[in-house]
Image: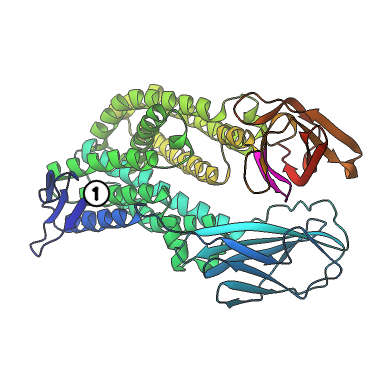
Amino acid sequence: MISVGAPPSGRATISCYDGMNAAQPSSTIRLHTGPLAWLVAVLVAMAALAMPGRALAHAALVATDPADGSVLTQSPAKFSLSFSEPVSPLVLTLVRPDGSQLALTSFRLNDQTIEIDNPETLKSGTHVLSWRVVSVDGHPVGGSALFSIGAPSAAPVAAEAVDWTLRAAIWAARLFFYAGLFLGVGGAFALAWLAEDRRCGQRFVAAALLFGLAGAPLSLGLQGLDGLGAPLARFAAPAVWKTALETSFVWTVLIGLIALGLALLSLAGPSGVRKLSASAALLGVGAALAASGHASAAEPQWLTRPLVFLHGMAIAFWAGSLAPLGLALRRQPAEAKVFLRRFSRAILPVIVLLAASGIVLAIIQVQQPAALINTSYGRLLLLKLALLLFLFTLAAVNRWTLTVPAEAGDTEVQRRLARSIRIEVVIVLAILGVAAGWRFTPPPRALAIAAAQPVSIHIHTLEAMADLSITPGHAGEVTASMMIMTGDFGPLDAKGVTLVLSKPESGIEPIKRPATKPGDGTWRVDNLVIPLPGRWNARLDILVSDFEMVKIEAPIDIRSD
């Protein structure tokens, strides 16, 4: 357990209890840095509040009107969704049979029921009522119900509705946050350790840090909006921030804010304090990036998290040093020689570390070379690699042709080097912009995991019921697994089970496969090929005895990939 205290003396005390003896703290950290102590105390308290340490109930859908799977003779005047507890609607959408979407914005809350007005007369065919709400505990809950007018049709396939305004805000906030971490914190480290306490470039670094301090909380709130699928107008809603605080990204923001605060502290004070604060801030950059994100969440995490940690620090060191160095060469060329010499000596191992960690992370994320072309993530990675190649080439030219004469005091070369460094800073900003775009593109590794997930349905009748699972849940070669029970959840010792899949609207005759019983209580069909994605009708022919056959069926949706 962690307790945070901030007595009037201005010293913040953080006590850590080991859980065995709550009366005595196992360790106590006292911070004597005045305002910094208050900052750390507040951030740690926020982190403690954000930790998922309690079990909360989620709202569950109790009933829908029209009922799921029902067929109506005429268009309903309204819809209703009844839940197990009061909810607040976020997004209500009706998907028509042709796949077009209709936003349902007129609704009323009646205790635990949402009554939704239908603004148009619905045409024949199958419709999908999609909903996303927030329960009283702040957790988002979503789902869909299907109903048909006149007669069922193929289930509509809706194109993803993209809120480009929200995406642009997420991208911009993430770019500001990255600029603060890499250009701001890295720049503060360069000023403290490489520039001999000279102040040239300090305004640029301070501005980058302020951009990061603004972008961090904005990114967190926008993360909540994106998680709930809510529009930008709901940015201040408590449910949005509660949802954001329950994501792993909150740790990236909290650690990042601490790193940004330490970097600001390093811009003032004696040399020793500046170096210590800047070093801690640079470590904070690596820790912030390793706390969440696609790369840090990949397996094996014992490898990926340390690699993200090192990769982030290497980027911050290199990118953050560029602007202060370029400004020093332009404004104080004589005094910049020491800065340049130290940077040129340190940058080679940093680039090796950056490249090695980046290559390993890219291999883990992409997995297959074809994914570089076939996925949005891969194409963004190629764009980043192209920019990095340009940046590495420019840096190599600077290192091997301009650095030595610039250190010797050649003013013309110093001006050329300063101009080249400005180009490097622009390229770095472009790379950060590309990296911010990864927020919207799951890596091929994650797509492969999702594609391997099964699809499952529960079929329940008075005579019998079954749990049917198809793995993977997309078209192609699959394995079907069935758990057979009686209608009252009792064991059913069937003599045989046959799986029948049909899709008559696509001209496909029923696919019949007898199941085998491997001995674990389930029935299986191996090496089954489902030729097309879409909605299939799954039927189980259960031979209860030599004289009794029970047939149960239900639709099942097969993904395209």
Circle 1 residue: 262
- Is any part of residue 197 visible from this angle? no
- Residue 71: image quadrant is bottom right
Is residue 461 a member of the stretch shown in magenta? yes
Question: Residue 261, position in %: x, y?
Answer: 26, 52
Asked which secondary structure carries label 1, the reply is helix
- Residue 357: image quadrant is top left
Question: Residue 433, position in %: x, y?
Answer: 51, 45
- Please tell me how many numbered marks the rendered image carries: 1
Q: What residue is rendered at 87% in x and 68% in y? A: 73
In the image, what residue type sits under mark 1? Leu
Question: Residue 198, position in %: x, y?
Answer: 21, 43
Measured along the vertical axis of the image, is residue 211 above or below residue 78? above
Q: Residues within 10 Å of mark 1 (few under 14, many from 20)?
A: many
- Is any part of residue 219 visible from this angle? yes
In the shown orientation, is residue 118 left or right of residue 467?
Answer: right
Q: Nearer the viewer, residue 177 or 421?
A: 177
Is residue 410 a member of the stretch shown in magenta? no
Question: Residue 339, position in %: x, y?
Answer: 26, 34
In the shown orientation, is residue 226 left or right of residue 357?
Answer: right
In the shown orientation, is residue 443 left or right of residue 237?
Answer: right
- Residue 344: image quadrant is top left
Q: What residue is rendered at 76% in x and 47% in y? A: 554
Q: What stretch of residues is rendered in magenta?
A: 455-469
